[in-house]
Amino acid sequence: MTQQQKPSIGRIVHFVLADGQHRAATVVNAWPDAPDGICNLTVHLDGCNDFTPGLHMAAPNLIPQGAFATGSTLSVGSAHQDESAKLPGTWHWPERE
């Protein structure tokens, strides 16, 4: 029997942007027994690919509700885990290829 992974501080997960793209995120606070794997994340944006042209800020169409841009990262509080639908604004474990 394999034990289900639980989020913990410092783990890398994938976060789903508003347009459905995935980005690496670091867990900055976790409540392992919380429903839906709720945790706080810092999402690492993909440099100029995720910025508004001519500005050094995240493109608004990438930022899901509840997230806010801080330079080249997004801060997300109380993100829910979603391993199946992978809806925008949720996180999941990295896919194994």
Image: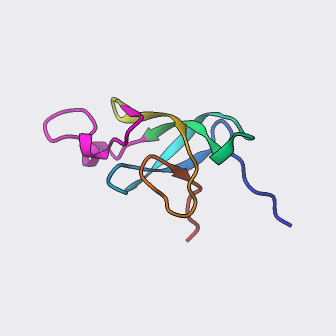
On the picture, is 87 further left or further right than 32?
left
Dividing the image into 4 quarters, which one contains the C terminus?
bottom right
Q: Residue at x 50, y 62 (%)?
A: 85
Q: Nearer the viewer, residue 49 or 81?
A: 81
Residue 94, position in %: x, y? 56, 58
| Residue 86 image position (x, y, % from top left) | 49, 58
Q: Magenta stretch: residue 59 in it?
A: yes
Which picture quadrant has residue 84?
bottom right
Magenta extent: 44-68
Return the residue found at the far front: 35
**Name of the residue lying farthest toward the left:** 54
- Which percent across, then down, holds residue 79? 53, 41
Is 66 one of the magenta-colored residues?
yes
Q: Which quadrant holds residue 31?
A: top right
The residue shown at (28%, 38%) is 58
Residue 59 visible: no
Answer with the quarter of the image where residue 20 lies: bottom left
- Say whether residue 66 is left or right of residue 77: left
Residue 11 versus residue 16 in the image, above or below: above
Q: Is residue 48 above or below residue 30?
A: below
Placement of 1 over or under 77, stated as above or below = below
Residue at position x 71%, y 48% from top? Answer: 6
Q: Tell me if I can see residue 24 in this picture.
A: yes
Q: Is residue 78 left or right of residue 52?
A: right
